[in-house]
Structures are given as structure tokens and as C-alpha cells.
Amino acid sequence: MKATWNGAMIAESDDTVLVEGNHYFPESALNRAFVTFSNHRTACAWKGQAHYHSLLVNGELNPDAVWYYPDPKPEAENIRGRVAFWKGVKVEA
């Protein structure tokens, strides 16, 4: 699977976990050159608290486009150490 945004490869991996229609990539697959700070947080009843990263590619900012669960609840343990994307980030095989 590949995650791209604004012409850049954000992540690529053959090892993704599909949860609620979202591919969770290993954190190590994330291209850190395009990742920037976000202090955004949301809560999921069964996964726990999500933390976010923003993307900065070719001078364009995509706020909170990457999310992850640093300490997922037991039911979501399979996404620990993984990241997922939204806000226009294209994920495809």
C-alpha cells in the first residue's frame, strides 16, 4: 500500500492493518521528511485517544492528516505503532 499527498510518497508498506476502512501503516514506513507537529487529539470509544501529525509538502500544510494511537485500548492493540491517513491523503495499492 502507498500513501501519497501533494505529489509526495508519505508512506509505503506491504504490512498494513485494515480497521474501519483505514489502512494503518507501520510507523517506520512514515516518511518523516514530510511530518510536522500537531497537538490535536481526539477520542475513540474502543480504540482510545488518537494523536495527530500534520504534513508539510512543497510548502503546503495539511493539518492533522496523520493519526495514531500511542496507547490503544486492548481491543485495538493491533494498531499500536501504526499510523493512518485522511484529509486528502490518497491510500492505494
Image: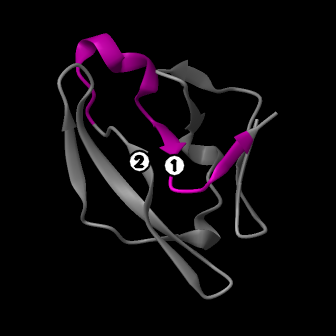
- Figure check: 18 above or below 85: above
Tell me which residue sits at (58%, 82%) in the image.
60
The residue furthest bottom is 59
**In the image, is residue 87 part of the stretch drawn in magenta?**
yes
Please report contact status of discs 1 and 2: CB closer than 8 Å, yes or no: yes
Look at label 1 and name its amino acid.
Trp
- Please, what secondary structure does the residue beneath circle 1 have? loop
Residue labelled with disc 1? 86
- Please, what secondary structure does the residue beneath circle 2 have? strand
Q: Quadrant of residue 13?
A: top right
Q: Mark 1 vs mark 2: give the one in front.
A: 1
Quadrant in which the N terminus appears? top right
Tell me which residue sits at (23%, 21%) in the image.
73
Residue labelled with disc 2? 67
Q: Position of residue 72 (x, y in %)?
A: 27, 27
Tell me which residue sits at (82%, 33%) in the image.
93
Look at label 2 and name its amino acid.
Trp
Left or right position of 40 against 3:
left
Judge the density around disc 1: few (<14), some (14-19), many (≥20) Cα neighbours within 10 Å.
Answer: some
- Figure check: 71 above or below 64: above
**In the image, is residue 48 part of the stretch drawn in magenta?**
no
**Upstream in the sequence, badge 1 or badge 2?**
2
Q: Position of residue 92 (x, y in %)?
A: 76, 38
Tell me which residue sits at (44%, 18%) in the image.
78
Task: State which region is magenta.
Answer: 71-91
Q: Quadrant of residue 37?
A: bottom left
